[in-house]
Image (tube, helix red, strand yellow):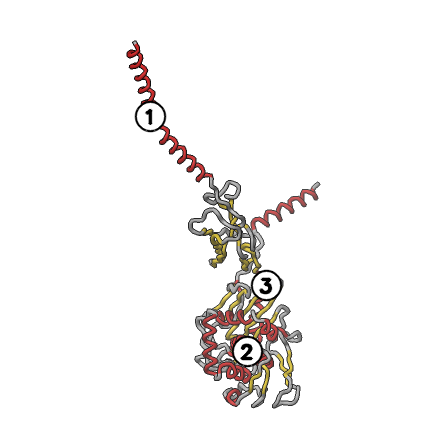
Amino acid sequence: MKFKKLILCLIAFIFALSIILPVRSFADGNNLNITSESAILIDSDTGKVLYDKSAYEKHEPASTTKIMTALLTLEHCKLDDVATVTSEAITSVPSGYSSDLLKMGEELSIKDLLYALLLPSSNEAANVLAIHIAGSIDSFASMMNTRAIELGCKNTHFVNPNGVHDEEHYTTAYDLALIAREAMKNDTFKQIVSTVAYTLPSSNNYSRIDRNLITTNDLIKRQSENYYEYAIGIKTGFTTPAKNCLVAAAKKDDKTLISVVLGANTDDDRYSNTKTLLNYGFENFSKKDIVKTNDIVQTIDVKNATSKTKNLNLVAESGINTIVTNDKINDKVEPTVTLNDNLQAPIKKDTIVGTATYTVDNIQYTINLKAGNDVKKSYTLYIVIGVAIIALILILFEKPSKKRNKKSTRKNAGNRYNGYYKAR
């Protein structure tokens, strides 16, 4: 008996403790030990910021610049287009930045140049692509800046396609995340930045097939101590003023995250900071369907509708999926519904009848609402009004007739009376 009582007491104690000290399901990002000068973590699907440290401060991006160069190349060229390595492309690379990978006058496909750009980070390849697309490096830099503005970048200014040091060449962790997110929408870009090794073919000016390109991104190298099993890219960068930089992407289950670290003191710091950010995102955030396509958001009564069809289902034209901290995964989000002006019968199914706005973590998501069913117009009121009008008309016309009948009766009676006395 004593043993059973002890067990019961222990169970009661554990239950009480679980109420008093609930298990936390979310780790505060403020406790992350990020040593880089600037960093950010975003959800690739929604663009939502999950963590940032000085993410809006200007920094030199070094070779992470080449993400934008690759994006513009893929938007303006075909992979089998051919570009020529010009003298300007070679000689405009400062001493100490040259890889001596490409040969003067060599003709290479855009695909091969992209691999040279993104794996071993060839500065010459960046220049070749810039000149091929825009005619000059300066003109290409203008294209880069225009595209950055289009993507929502607020503090970015490029002066070259490769990230070679220049005090007027800068961006922010946030802006780089925007650029990387857009680039990762391109399947060719995704394939290249997740590739560890690639061999350039022979060309008109280089007959050997011995130019083996190896990525500078240790996150995707299985043999590296910095390997990260969920990594799928993207690009490293380094100059003495910029320090160590890394833009990374990783996918686990249903989440794809993008991280940026700028100004890391050492090579190991940029990798450890990146892994810390990515692990934080995977462990503490979950995808949440706020509403699914064709879900019934609300049901309303429609004016002038028949009794059988007056109940209208407001249906979500599209779904809303976001990412939230684990402690908010079961929270219900109520929408603000705005209906079209003068909404009344008749309404056809699938007609857009209004909008629904959901607010999650101070971010608003708005979708169209469509009619989930037909709503037929009721003519009962019109019938009642019509009957009333007809009845009124009949009444108005009926009264004079009765008066005439009464007058006629009196006249006939008078005639009969007069005739009576005449007969007598």
Identify the residue position indicated by label 2 in the image: 77
Q: Is residue 158 above or below residue 319?
A: below
Identify the residue position indicated by label 3 in the image: 255
Q: Nearer the viewer, mark 3 or mark 2?
A: 2
Q: Amino acid at mark 2?
A: Cys
Residue 397: image x %, image y %?
36, 31
Looking at the image, which is closer to me, 2 or 221?
221
Which label's residue is closer to the chain start, 3 or 1? 3
Q: Amino acid at mark 1?
A: Arg
Q: Secondary structure at mark 3?
A: strand
Q: Is residue 3 left or right of residue 280?
A: right
Identify the residue position indicated by label 1 in the image: 404
Q: Nearer the viewer, mark 3 or mark 1?
A: 1
Looking at the image, which is closer to me, 8 or 141?
141
Quadrant location, the N terminus: top right
Q: Is residue 237 above or below residue 345?
A: below
Residue 347: image x %, image y %?
49, 49
Q: Please give the name of the residue rendered at 56% of the width and 75% of the height, measured from the top-left corner.
A: 235
- Cα separation, mark 3 vs mark 1, equals 91 Å
Looking at the image, which is closer to me, 214 or 183?
183
The answer to whether one can see residue 272 in this image is no
> Badge 3, how many Cα within 10 Å: few under 14, some, many 20+?
some
Q: Secondary structure at mark 1?
A: helix
Q: Amino acid at mark 3?
A: Lys
- Cα separation, mark 1 vs mark 2, equals 97 Å
- Disc 1 to disc 2: CB gap under 8 Å: no
* Quadrant in the rendering for residue 198: bottom right
